[in-house]
Amino acid sequence: MNRNELKKIMPHRDPMLLLDEATRIEENKGIAKYEVRGDEFFLQGHFPGNPIVPGVIQCEMMAQSCAVLFESEGGFTPLFTGIKECKFRRPVKPGDVLEIHAEITKAKPPFYFAKARVLVDGALASQAEISFALVDTDV
């Protein structure tokens, strides 16, 4: 899925749509990509002369990669309910192409649990366990 296709299944819009593309590889697994261009809003001031993608933005990228896996759950919005075991292994900088792996590990509707990780050039940059609630979009 490209950005236009992602907009059909996700509520996120610019500047908060933080994926360039995504592919479901199994029912509960997917891979997304994002190229850090250097002009993103979250790099302004973080840090001048040494821009680094904030950890919270990496968490949002992981969450959005998981949200793609809820494509078949039309009419619902996945809301972040928790994050744990979050670790940052290396800085993410402009020019990096992020490969974000997401996997739904458990479901107790409306709650879902996932693991995600961000790789840059095959090296682990960050990882987390994330939980969501699927909430009726019309509420």
Image (cartoon, rainbow, N blue to C red):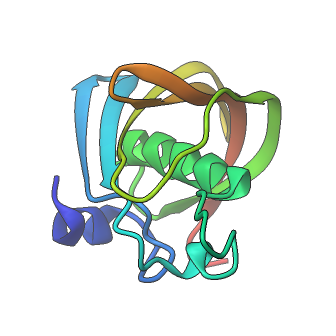
The residue located at (33%, 55%) in the rendering is 95
Q: Who is closer to the viewer here, 15 or 103?
A: 15
Residue 87 locus on image (x, y percent): 75, 28
Going by the image, does 26 lie left or right of 76? left
Residue 129 screen position, x and y as percent: 70, 27
User: Which residue is pictured at 69% across the width and 44% down the height?
Assistant: 132
Q: Identify the residue at image location x=51%, y=75%.
A: 16
Left or right, 79 with respect to 83, comes to left
Image quarter for residue 65? top left
Residue shown at 72% from the left, 37% from the top: 131
**Could you say which quadrant of the image residue 23 lies in?**
top left
Q: In this view, does 63 lie above or below 76?
A: above
Identify which residue, 128 or 122, lies in the foreground. 122
x%, y% of residue 83?
79, 38
Q: Which of 18 and 7 is in front in this view?
A: 18
Q: Nearer the viewer, residue 9 or 97?
A: 97
Q: Position of residue 38 (x, y in %)?
A: 41, 71
Quadrant in which the C terminus is drawn: bottom right
Residue 61 versus residue 9 in the image, above or below: above
Total count of labels: 0
Query: For residue 28, which quarter of the picture?
Result: top left
Q: Is residue 7 above or below residue 127?
A: below
